[in-house]
Image (tube, rainbow, N blue to C red):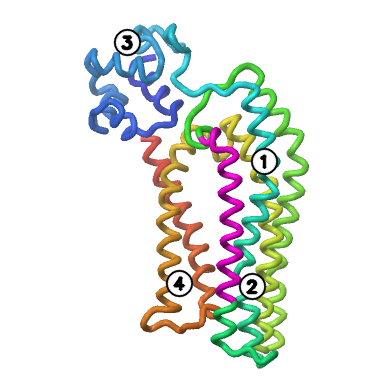
Amino acid sequence: MIFADKLITLRKKAGWSQEELAEKLNVTRQSVSKWEGAQSVPDIDKILQLSCLFGVTTDYLLKDDTAEPEYTEDDTSPLPRVTLAQANDYLAKARANAPKLALATALCVVSPIPLLALGALSEAGLFGIWDDLAGGIGLIALLVIIAAAVAIFMQCSASVRAYEFLQKQAIETEYGVTGLAKERSDAFAPQYDKANILGTVLCVLSAVPVFAAMMAGASFLVSASICLVLALVACGVYAFVRVGTVRDAMDQLLEEGDYTRPNKAIKSRINALTAAYWLVVVAIFLWYTFGPQGNGQPQYSWFIWAIGGILYAALVLVVKMALRKQNNK
């Protein structure tokens, strides 16, 4: 195996793109590309840096007849090592957090229901509720529910903060960790499949109330049906997140699924994009509802969140494809 092939293998094993490796070596991406394309060879200083960076010997990097990595004596790997005790602790915390995270996510889904329900009552002229009162109370209820959900998210995140590297970095595991995670994953598979089936059925059935209300032809019923849609979707999402949280923890230890080393590098970039994207969606919602030309009725602006969710899914898909293509260069 020549130097170029070894460099590609080591870089991908660490989950780094050419740009990330170039930054660590203080060189251009084009230089790394030339090394991996066997168009040039780095000087001795860079060879030493690569040896330290990947934890392999310089002989392994330079000798073509050495196919298997030869690790330095100080450390067999530059990657963080997960012990069996850490793996057990992390899996236990993931199981404890799973219902909490599922509840918080479901609360986010149902948060617009008070706003929509009060808007429907106002539109129907029931209980003497006028539009401004319905919008004000509904918006307060939405914010309270979101605040509760955020508090749960933060508490769960704090409990596993010591294990954040499992989601972001390539890892090495001590003897027994992989076997433990694999055994737990296999045992959990039936429960995971049942919950996903239930969640999918609930999400599909959530469209039924809207169709029924449209057939009835009453705008009041359409607004009410959307509340029922959100409730069904929330139940489906609860099922997805509860089992997904546990499965993700196992995949992180096994570096499988969404947590392979290349995917970890992609996730870190997508997380930054996600934060910026939803800030923009919130700004659009506030401007459309309360801006100079806003309608002043947030119960009629809910569609912004639906469109934002669909566009977000499409955006993430496109970004993942672009980053994977870049990492494979």
197 over 203 or under it: above or below: above
Report helix, strand or loop for mark 4. helix
Quadrant location of the C terminus in the rendered image? top left
- Of the residues shown, which amino acid type is indicated by label 3? Leu
Question: Closer to the observer: label 2 or label 3?
Answer: 2
Q: Please give the range of residues in magenta.
A: 138-164
| Camera-nearest residue between 167 and 148 | 148
How packed mark 2 is, by other alpha carbons closer than 10 Å (few <14, some 14-19, many 20 or more), is many
Let me know if residue 158 is in the magenta part: yes
Q: Quadrant of residue 219?
A: bottom right
Q: Quadrant of residue 108?
A: bottom right
Circle nearer the N terminus (4, 1):
1
- Of the residues shown, which amino acid type is indicated by label 4? Phe
How packed mark 4 is, by other alpha carbons closer than 10 Å (few <14, some 14-19, many 20 or more), is many
Query: According to the image, label 3 marks what residue?
Result: 62
Report helix, strand or loop for mark 2. helix
Q: Label 2 vs label 3: CA separation?
A: 64 Å
Query: According to the image, label 2 marks what residue?
Result: 113
Q: Label 1 vs label 2: CA separation?
A: 29 Å
Question: Which residue is drawn at the image coordinates 67% and 89% (left, top)?
Answer: 218
Determine which of the numbered discs, if any, sits on residue 246 in the image.
1
Q: Label 4 vs label 1: CA separation?
A: 34 Å
